[in-house]
Image (cartoon, rainbow, N blue to C red):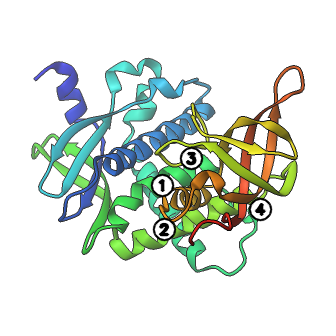
Amino acid sequence: MSEQSQSLMKAPRIRLHLNVHEPVELVELTLAFQGLGYEYQSFVKGQALPSGERSKNGDVKLYITKLETNCILAEMAPALPLFGALAPIFSDLNTVSEFVRNIGQLIDWLRSVEKKGELLPEEIPYSKRKLSNVRDIVRLVGRAKDANLGLQAIRYEEESGKDRAVLEMTFTDSACQEAERGAIRALQVLDGREKADLEKVLMYFYQTNIEDPKSTGRTGDKAIISSVSPEPLSVYVIPETDQQKIRYVLDDKSHNPLHTGFVVDVNIENDRKGRPRIYRVLRVHDVIYDEGDAV
């Protein structure tokens, strides 16, 4: 074992226990690890700022030091030898424990949101990115039966040569379901805060991908809103729930998806000459099927 590997094994670590007893989709597992990694990057960056040190998110990484497949158990440690002046911040057991505690508190907050009456944007103290990351962490367990999610902060004890958990949090599958629903609701509220350029206009898809509509990145989806432009423009759908709603309609074989209208609130992105280039759908209000299609 290399010196770096030994150092990682003896560093304070995060133990993620996805206690599921059935096959899991690789994408969902990847998203869970990715969500935890992104949140750790964000947390460490916040810890470094008061010290006057600067860190780039790309420099802050978790390394898997142990992986068991009898359920899914992974231990992750910060790459201490790579951090230089920031190493004392990252190697502090309190930092790792506080990170685990914060994730647990956010999951509990999302559970309370799922049961809350009215929810206003100003009542949501978290970014959309953070809400999405934690949603991805809890989703896999929430969709399994008799499963639970475990989060631990652990340290290596030289005297015994063994690890000891100094902080442990466990969430059942039903608790993870509540947290996922709370995250989706909070994201919807934050999406609804953005003001649309046009409200309740009729949009038709000109071409679609087989994947869900995207909110960012490259997309092959194009749509026409005749009141804006006769030309098909690239389209992004921001709320995840509306992405799924549109995908469901487009996949329905009982009608022609390119003849189906969507009543939407939309923002329009123009090019440098002021010509419309991109539609950003903020809300889907209704679906209008062609009269010749069976519904």
Q: Quadrant of the N terminus?
A: top left
Horizontal side, residue 120 vs residue 179: left or right = right
Q: Is residue 41 above or below residue 109?
A: above
Q: Mark 2 or mark 3, which is nearer the start of the sequence?
A: 2
Q: Amino acid at mark 4?
A: Glu
Which sits in the foreground, 293 or 106?
A: 293
Q: State the SS at label 2.
A: helix
| Separation (CA) of disc 1 from disc 3 | 22 Å
Q: Could you say whether the residue bearing mark 3 is in a helix, strand or loop?
A: loop
The residue type indicated by label 1 comes to: Val
Judge whether 50 appears above or below 120 on screen. above
Residue 56 in sight here = yes
Q: Earlier in the sequence, mark 4 or mark 2?
A: 4
Mark before the other along the chain sequence, 1 or 2: 1
Tag nearer the camera, 3 or 4: 3
How many numbered discs?
A: 4
Residue 151 x %, y %: 33, 57
Q: What is the C-alpha distance between the residues marked 3 and 4?
A: 28 Å
The Cα atoms of the two marked residues, 4 and 2, are separated by: 19 Å
Disc nearest the viewer among 1 and 3: 3
- Along the polypeptide, which appears first: circle 1 or circle 4? 4
Q: Can you tell which of label 3 and label 2 is closer to the viewer?
A: 3
The residue that label 4 is drawn on is: 122
Disc 3 and disc 2: Cα gap in Å? 24 Å
Q: CA distance from mark 1 to mark 4?
A: 20 Å
Callout 4 secondary element: helix
* Disc marking residue 179: 2
Q: Earlier in the sequence, mark 1 or mark 3?
A: 1
Q: Residues within 10 Å of mark 2 (few under 14, many from 20)?
A: many
Which residue in the protein does label 1 denote? 134
The residue drawn where x is 57% and y is 63% is 184
Rendered location of residue 112, percent (x, y): 56, 75
